[in-house]
Amino acid sequence: MATYKAVIIGLTGIGAQRQTAGSSSIYGNIPQSHAAAYHVHPQIELVAVCDIRQTMLDNFRQTWQDVWPHLRYYTDAFAMLAEERPDIVSVVTPDHLHADLTVAAANHGAKAIFCEKPIATSLADADRMIAACEANHVLLSVDHTRRWYPLYQEARQLLRSGELGPLRSMVTSLFSQRAMLFRNGAHLIDMLHFFAEADAQWVWAELEAGFDHFASYQGDGGHNPASEPAASGYLHFTNGVRAFYESAKLDFPGAQFSLTCENGRIEISDKTLTIIRQETGGQLSHTSVAPNPAAESGLLAAVGELIQVLENGGELISSGRNARKTLEVILAMLQSHTRGNVRVNLPL
């Protein structure tokens, strides 16, 4: 098997933690970070990491010294890209700093880039990233993680089967103190596209109170929940599917979807998938669906997909162009709110 050199830029939890969760029949416990996924995947050799904070580099060395005793450490990402010439680059920096690093990686010989979501915080930055990757024939995958979760894959396969009839409407909710529109709302808005399999045609929205000034991104990169709003909104897709999005910063947690079809409903969260049908006499039946026990999940599946497409060709399930659609909806939601909660047509 070919081996690919990888580097990580940004050593926060999702970039660097060693934590695992659950189990996978393929590789054991499921990695919960880019570093953990690279550690598990047999075709990837992590050669260097970068963070502008020395404390984060020291923490990474302490956490991973037994695995990568000869790893190289940088505080300058551009120098690392020039010196290491990696095959795969993880961009795990604050949300608004993805663009320059992705463009530099594409221009320094990377074969694939795995970028955290959202792809960027402006369409201009997203377009620069996509253009640089396409010009250099570089794969760009964006970590909208649920696209690789087996339960969500099962739900989309059920929708595609037609067993429940056409998809009509969707409702998704996000409750958490970190229910920020760009940082975590992006996951749910992306999944609305994933299930609808169409582009959003228009949206309207209302932001969390106190964010009337938020006409464009003004957050801190995803750190402080107070720096960006929660939101409620409505998406109308080109195929007629309608979707409601709601989020609130609450101590009570939750993220779930309700997908209503002509002849039934799918209710799904990260842990459960239930099919609801109407039976004779108007009674409702509830059927739980288990995911494929042999399926890869999350970050490990995303990394495995990058290798698969590098070696065999094909389409990425969470490409830069797909991620741009989510960003465009988020920016349209900002426009809707600041213009008096009006309908905003897409594309912007």
Image (cartoon, helix red, strand yellow):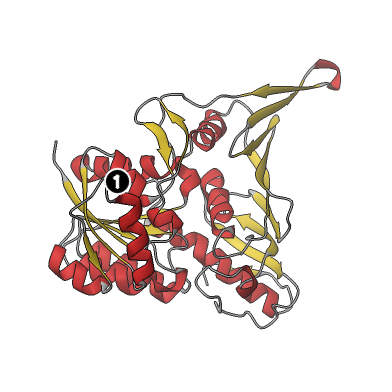
* 63 to 43, vertically: above or below: below
* 222 to 213, vertically: above or below: above
Task: From the top left corner, tell me how far across and down residue 185 is, in percent.
Answer: 59, 59
Task: From the top left corner, tell me how far across and down residue 49 is, in percent.
Answer: 27, 61
Mark 1 packing: few (<14 Cα in 10 Å), some, or many (20+)?
many
In the picture of the structure, the residue carrying the numbered disc 1 is 38
Name the residue rendered at 53%, 33% in the picture.
151
Instruction: Give the position of the N terminus as an image quadrant.
Output: top left
Task: From the top left corner, tell me how far across and down residue 295 is, in percent.
Answer: 41, 29
Q: Residue furthest right?
A: 281
Looking at the image, residue 52 sits to the left or right of residue 276; the answer is left
Of 93 and 73, the residue lying toward us:
73
Mark 1 residue element: helix
Q: Residue furthest bottom?
A: 213
Name the residue rendered at 15%, 43% in the picture.
3
Of 295 and 263, the residue lying toward us:
295
Task: From the top left corner, tell me how far across and down residue 243 is, in percent.
Answer: 66, 52
Of 170 and 175, the residue lying toward us:
175
* 340 to 22, vertically: above or below: below
Query: Does the rendering let one see residue 296?
Result: no
Q: Amino acid at mark 1?
A: Tyr
Looking at the image, residue 260 sits to the left or right of residue 39; the answer is right
Looking at the image, residue 32 sits to the left or right of residue 315; the answer is right
